[in-house]
């Protein structure tokens, strides 16, 4: 088996508590691999009225794991770019894509020729997620590149990589 350097790293973000450490890990790897970083936020479109209600209410729409509306996607993407830039990564694209998250990530990997896809995954999934599957599960089944899944160390505790240069 030959080992290759990553020239492009793709990372997904959804604005959740796991998004920041996931983007941080991807940014750290991209910087140390001298790779371009592409950040993707897939979202579901809402009507203007539903989007306003979603923004105005804590928790918004009860559909878990989805970024609901362009405003929420823009906020998640803006935060992800800030985190990545803080780690010194070269962000070559920050994409808001309407549609299924797994499909958006796989299409982006293909389009940019990424060698690594980084995403966050919780270990405590709901009954519905067990039946229907998660974004991480779908990507593991379908992706054709290396995949790094970032998980929290303990509930409520998420480790962010420190700079390894010393």
Image (tube, helix red, strand yellow):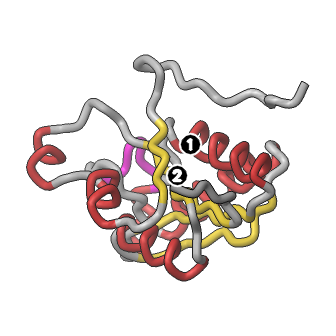
Q: Nearer the viewer, mark 2 or mark 1?
A: 2
Measured as percent of width and height from the top left, residue 113 is found at 58, 76
Measured as percent of width and height from the top left, residue 87 is found at 80, 43
The residue positioned 55% from the left and 65% from the top of the image is 40
Q: Considering depth in this image, is 105 or 49 the residue closer to the camera?
A: 105
Q: Are marks 2 and 1 in contact (CB under 8 Å)?
A: yes
Q: Considering depth in this image, is 49 or 127 the residue closer to the camera?
A: 127
Magenta residues, as a range? 55-61
Image quadrant where residue 154 sits: top left
Q: Considering depth in this image, is 96 or 30 the residue closer to the camera?
A: 30
- Tell me the SS state at disc 1: helix
Q: Is residue 136 left or right of residue 81?
A: left
Crowdedness near tag 1: few (<14), some (14–19) or many (≥20) residues, C-alpha within 10 Å: many
Could you say which disc has been placed on residue 22 in the image?
1
In this view of the protein, can residue 10 be seen by the observer? Answer: yes
Number of marks present in the image shown:
2
């Amino acid at each position: 088996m030959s080992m290759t350097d990553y020239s492009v790293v793709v990372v997904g973000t959804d604005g959740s508590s796991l998004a920041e450490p996931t983007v941080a890990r991807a940014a750290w790897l991209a910087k140390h691999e001298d790779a371009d970083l592409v950040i993707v936020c897939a979202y579901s479109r809402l009507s203007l009225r539903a989007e306003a209600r979603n923004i105005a209410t804590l928790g918004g729409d009860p559909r878990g794991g989805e970024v609901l509306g362009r405003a929420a996607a823009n906020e998640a993407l803006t935060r992800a770019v800030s985190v990545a830039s803080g780690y010194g990564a070269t962000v070559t694209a920050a994409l808001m894509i309407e549609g299924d998250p797994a499909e958006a990530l796989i299409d982006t990997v293909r389009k940019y020729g990424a060698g690594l896809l980084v995403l966050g995954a919780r270990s405590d999934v709901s009954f519905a997620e067990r039946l229907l599957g998660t974004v991480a599960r779908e990507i593991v089944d379908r992706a054709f590149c290396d995949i790094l899944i970032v998980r929290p160390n303990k509930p409520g505790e998420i480790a962010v990589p420190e700079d390894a240069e010393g």
